Amino acid sequence: MEWLMGALGLVILLLAGDALVKGAVNLSLRVGIPALIVSLTIVAFGTSAPELLISITAALEGVPGIAVGNVVGSNTANVLLVLGVPALLATMHTSECNTRKSYVLMMAGSVLFVALAFFGQFTWVSGVVLLLALALVLGDAVRDARAHRAAGQLVEADEPEGADPDMPWWKICMFLALGLVGLPLGANLLLDSAVTIARTFGLSESVIGLTMVAIGTSVPELATTVMAALRRQADVALGNVIGSNMFNLLAIIGIASMVSPIPVDPEFLHFDLWVMLGASALLFPFVFLKRDITRIWGVVLTLLYVSYVMSVLS
């Protein structure tokens, strides 16, 4: 029953997050906020809403291991699993992508996150630091996008996902209501079941956060990346992973730590944070050396992730 309730909570979370994105995007466009700003802020926050609600709820309910584990585990899964599985289906031609700047910012955010973790807990001060870093990243993204548009180049962010200029007001309100009601409901269901499962099998909340919760909340990124790989849109696949990781590090823990202090399990400092950094570093040849993520790399990345999960569970 707990596994069923956890699965139900995850489904509600994912559907509610999608509904919130659609409602917020179209509301923002209706009131005159530029599409570019909507894409770089509202869509990015909306797609990270499930992870955010899980981390905030975990912090408030006294299971901080799930909050930190969700972020660390999701970032590791995003690189090894979310890029590994699609590469098994089709080679991703990342040699044609220009994601160097985004990758450097993601690595800088990862190092900042690890450094703050070594203080023993994420406090409101840590939250301010992470959110200031996020503001700098968003400001830089807005400047770059405007420069590209001014130069006459197409900007993918000009067309936010879920945008519908003809969407009626009642539908916008319905999507917003479903998102705002569904997110906390799904988060509570998933979190309660995860804690119960952890205690039943003698696992720590940190382990559940690193595995079950992290994999579950990475499902949208995996689905997006699989479709991008099949459509041979390597830039979308790689950009999706880098952007998601950056938001996980800076926005989710940044906001959650403003709500309640989040202690860091010593095991994260000894092992899991370094695995996350190592996984992120594995993207270096694909970003800077113009290598494609071939099927062989897909096998390597996927096996690395399976090995990591097995080591955590053991």
Image (cartoon, helix red, strand yellow):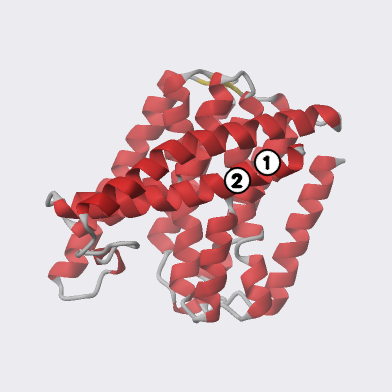
Say what secondary structure mark 2 lies in: helix
Q: Residues within 10 Å of mark 1 (few under 14, many from 20)?
A: many
Left or right side of 199 for 288: left
Task: Answer left or right for 274 relative to 121.
Answer: right
> Disc 1 designates what residue?
6
Gap between marks 1 and 2 measured at Cα: 6 Å
Relative image position of residue 36 (x, y in whole percent): 22, 58
User: Which numbered circle lies on residue 144?
Assistant: none
Residue 266's quadrant in the figure? top right
- Counting every numbered tag in the picture gives 2
Image coordinates for residue 104, horizontal then vertical, percent:
44, 54
Q: Are marks 1 and 2 in contact (CB under 8 Å)?
A: yes
The quarter of the image holding the C terminus is top right
Q: Amino acid at mark 1?
A: Gly
**179 or 54: nearer the viewer:** 179
Q: Which residue is mark 2?
A: 10
Query: Which residue is painted at 37% across and 26% down in the image?
Result: 128
29 to the left or right of 185 = left
Q: Amino acid at mark 2?
A: Leu
Q: Is residue 9 left or right of residue 122?
A: right
Is residue 140 visible from the viewing direction of this image? no
Q: Residue at x 60, y 46 (%)?
A: 10
The location of residue 134, given as percent across then percent down, is 36, 40
Mark 1 residue element: helix
Q: Is residue 99 above or below residue 205?
A: below
Tell me if I can see residue 10 in this picture: yes
Badge 2: residue crowd in 10 Å (few <14, some 14–19, many ≥20):
many
Image-quadrant location for residue 54: top right
